Amino acid sequence: MRQSPQTWFITGVSTGFGLELSKLLLEQGATVAGTVRRMEDLAAFEALAPGRAHAFRLDLTESHTIAPLVAHVLERLGTVDVVVNNAGYGTAGAIEEVTEEQIRRQMEVNFFGALSVMRAFLPHLRQRRQGWILNLSSIAGVIANPGLGMYCASKFALEAVSEALAKELAPLGIKVVIIEPGPFRTDFAGRSLVVAPALPDYAATAGAMRRYFEQADGKQAGDPVKAARAMIDLVNMPNPPLRLAMGNRAVDLIRAKLESQMAELTQHEAWARSLDYDPS
């Protein structure tokens, strides 16, 4: 196991995974550039480790600010070893229930914002021929459930880009890891969750997801500190996985989804194979 890289860039460090990861890294002597949306959170983050905790304001919906911010971070710190796309949130509501504005913002933050961060750092990472990109997806990046369709769409898209990028960057010595947490005790199901207006016809589907979040908030089994430690462990691995599920629920449900998908593929395999042109 080699020493952890020392300079990290993490989006969304005011709460949740981003904050816990930052605190662990700072305790280990690393330098962390973290982004927050609110100006009042800047000083609180930098107070965690003056001189090594650097806070920057970033709203991922303001796409035109991302590349200039990354340039500023690199000018200030000199280098970044690990980029962590952590910032994100969920929107609860059936596909028909969510508003156009909610749809656009969900994709802007969870997908387009993360994509812009990666693209802004790629010239630096390519020049160095080393580095890491950790993208926080979700169990919802593998399994789409009623009442979370737009959140799932944003994470499915992030997983697709991450998988392609991992193959593009592998020859250049840069590693990409997709992180798929299940329910963890963060603000995701509480303060951070956006809830769409409800339609009665979806009470048994999307409505059930809303009720789940109300009951689960603050009681999730996943420990954010353990998740943060796992992220640090990942960048100490010479051959990390492309995907890392986090938590029992994530492992169980992702396995069930893949087994079901394999069974369905096998069931219809002969039919699927018959659809090519005849060899003759």
Image: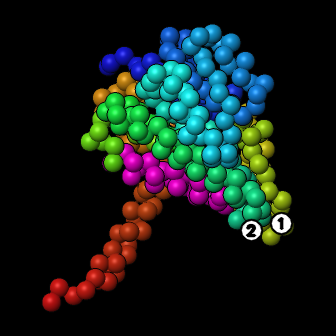
Q: Position of residue 145 (x, y in %)?
A: 62, 58
User: Which amino acid lies under the numbered mark 1 shown in the image of this protein?
Assistant: Leu
> Is residue 270 in view?
no
Picture layout, residue 184 above or below residue 270 = above
Eyeballing the image, is 260 above or below 158? below
State the residue at coordinates (65%, 58%): 150
Q: Write the start and end of the magenta stretch as one range.
A: 141-167
Residue 109: percent from left, percent from top: 64, 47
Quarter containing the C terminus: bottom left
89 left or right of 164 in image: right
Is any part of residue 261 visible from this angle?
yes
- The answer to which quarter of the image holds residue 62 is top right
Q: Give the dominant element type of the magenta stretch: helix, strand or loop.
A: helix
List the residue tagged with mark 2.
96
The reply to whether the magenta stretch includes residue 143 is yes
Q: Give the camera-side residue of 79 and 114.
A: 79
Query: In terms of depth relative to the viewer, which is nearer, 4 or 8?
Result: 8
Q: Is residue 252 left or right of residue 175?
A: right
Q: Tell me, yes or no, whether the highlighted magenta stretch contains residue 179.
A: no
Q: CA distance from mark 1 to mark 2?
A: 9 Å
Labels 1 & 2 near each other (Cβ < 8 A): yes
Q: Earlier in the sequence, mark 1 or mark 2?
A: 2
Q: Secondary structure at mark 2?
A: loop
Q: Quadrant of the N terminus?
A: top left
Which residue corresponds to the image point at 49% horizontal and 40% vertical from the top-left? 120
Identify the secondary structure beneath mark 1. loop
Q: Label 1: which residue?
A: 199
